[in-house]
Image: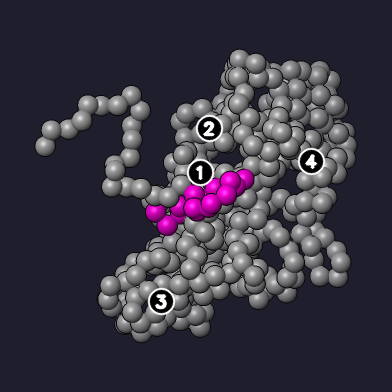
């Protein structure tokens, strides 16, 4: 068969068409990764989830500037070329919106016809490349009294978040690369803050300013937004770390098993606290559990794939997965999370997701 001529930029096969977003009739501020169609752990850049608060700015990299000031000895403006002169690091890490999975938790939003993309598509893993933030803070002479810094974006929403300095000295980076190429505009081009394992909103995109201080700035995004309402009229603030979580991606809606026999249950797991150490599978609604196999390499703060062979007998079954991370934290049931957070929480939905396999092979969400 005679082939077509090569193109300047590679394209997917016409037979491979994973949906980029859940189809909507109206414009939306987010789009979802098709988790059920992906292989491995790296999300292609054009399938990475998106979440925006004020549109996507179009920024000329030649005019880009990052100001670092406040409690520093040498307030400095860095151009993109300046950032690229520092030693770069590349890390495979997941990113997750803190509202991911809300439709599987809230009573009004839950439906049986949700796919993994519909339910948990606000998470992706990429190889992020950039300069460690601690190098920039050493360059400007961060004062030891500084315990927080403000990260500010240049989008129309002027996204701002207060971040503890401990994260800067640990693994925060100012990223300008993703999966071997410059950031996509939707992901913060030309440079963004990236905080591995922390809720996505804190990894401010289109980064333009970092201000060091000895206290949090109490911005709108951490007072009226991105707090966790708790029973008794309280709220949990600065709940940055994403808890251990797992998700079966096959068999799930809208798949249909074509008969009894051996099937491989597959999915992904992740945690903001380090590495996933164990994923268990239940095929009887949580009555009994067996260990799944984790696909190497198991990296910290990164999606990891799991698999488990299952000999389906043709009767109705409820499938579940349960993750444990290296701190000993175990993914909770929906009832356990509800007791801890109440019914009005809007963030950090990491409860176990059940899937119902019917006798005819159809699969539905059973949460």
Comes first in the chain, label 3 or label 4: 4
Q: Cβ–Cβ below 8 Å for labels 2 and 3? A: no
Residue occupying the point 34% across, 66% down = 264
Q: Which mark is residue 162?
A: 4
Element type where label 3 sits in the image: strand
Instruction: Point out the tag, 2 or 4, that comes first from the N-terminus.
Output: 4
Q: Which residue in the protein does label 3 denote?
A: 357
Say whether residue 276 is magenta: no
| Mark with earlier residue (1, 4) | 1
Up-down: is 217 above or below 318?
A: above
* Part of the protein shown in magenta: 21-37
In the visual, does 259 lie left or right of 173? left
Contact? badges 1 and 2 (CB < 8 Å): yes
Q: Is residue 214 found left or right of 98 in the rendered image?
A: right
**Residue 131 x/y as whole percent:** 61, 27
Choose top left, top right, bottom left or bottom right for residue 84: top right
Q: Is residue 367 shown above or below 90? A: below
**What kind of secondary structure does the magenta stretch mostly adopt?**
loop
Q: Which residue is mark 1?
A: 48
Give the Cα separation between the discs numbered 3 and 1: 29 Å
Which residue: 11% across, 37% down? 1
Q: Please tell me which residue lies in front, 133 or 265.
A: 265
Reading the image, the residue beneath label 2 is 184
- Circle 2 residues within 10 Å: few <14, some 14–19, many ≥20: some
Q: Which of the two marks, 2 or 4, is nearer to us in this view?
A: 2
The stretch drawn in magenta includes residue 31 = yes
């Amino acid at each position: 068969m005679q082939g077509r001529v090569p193109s300047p930029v590679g394209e997917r096969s016409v037979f491979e068409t994973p949906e980029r977003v859940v189809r909507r009739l109206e414009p939306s501020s987010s789009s979802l990764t098709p988790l059920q169609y992906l292989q491995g752990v790296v999300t292609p850049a054009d399938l990475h989830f998106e979440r925006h608060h004020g549109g996507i700015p179009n920024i000329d990299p030649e005019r880009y500037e990052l100001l670092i000031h406040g409690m520093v000895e040498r307030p400095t403006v860095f151009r993109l070329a300046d950032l690229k002169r520092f030693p770069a690091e590349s890390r495979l890490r997941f990113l997750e919106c803190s509202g991911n999975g809300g439709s599987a938790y809230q009573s009004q939003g839950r439906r049986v016809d949700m796919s993994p993309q519909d339910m948990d598509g606000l998470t992706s893993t990429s190889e992020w490349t950039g300069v460690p933030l601690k190098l920039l803070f050493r360059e400007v002479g961060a004062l030891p009294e500084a315990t927080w810094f403000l990260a500010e974006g240049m989008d129309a929403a002027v996204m701002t978040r207060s971040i503890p300095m401990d994260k800067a000295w640990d693994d925060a980076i100012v990223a300008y690369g993703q999966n071997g190429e410059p950031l996509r505009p939707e992901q913060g081009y030309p440079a963004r803050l990236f905080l591995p394992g922390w809720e996505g909103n804190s990894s401010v995109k289109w980064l333009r300013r970092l201000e060091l201080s000895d206290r949090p700035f109490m911005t709108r995004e951490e007072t009226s937004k991105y707090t966790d309402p708790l029973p008794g009229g309280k709220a949990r603030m600065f709940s940055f770390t994403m808890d251990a979580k797992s998700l079966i991606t096959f068999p799930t809606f809208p798949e249909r098993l074509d008969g009894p026999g051996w099937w491989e249950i597959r999915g992904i797991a992740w945690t903001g606290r380090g590495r996933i150490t164990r994923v268990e599978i239940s095929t009887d609604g949580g009555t009994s559990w067996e260990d799944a196999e984790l696909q190497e390499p198991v990296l910290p703060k990164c999606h990891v794939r799991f698999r488990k062979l299952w000999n389906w007998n043709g009767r109705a079954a409820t499938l579940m997965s349960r993750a444990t991370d290296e701190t000993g934290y175990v993914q909770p049931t929906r009832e356990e999370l509800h007791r801890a957070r109440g019914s009005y929480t809007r963030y950090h939905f990491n409860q176990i997701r059940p899937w119902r396999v019917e006798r005819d092979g159809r699969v539905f969400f059973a949460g």
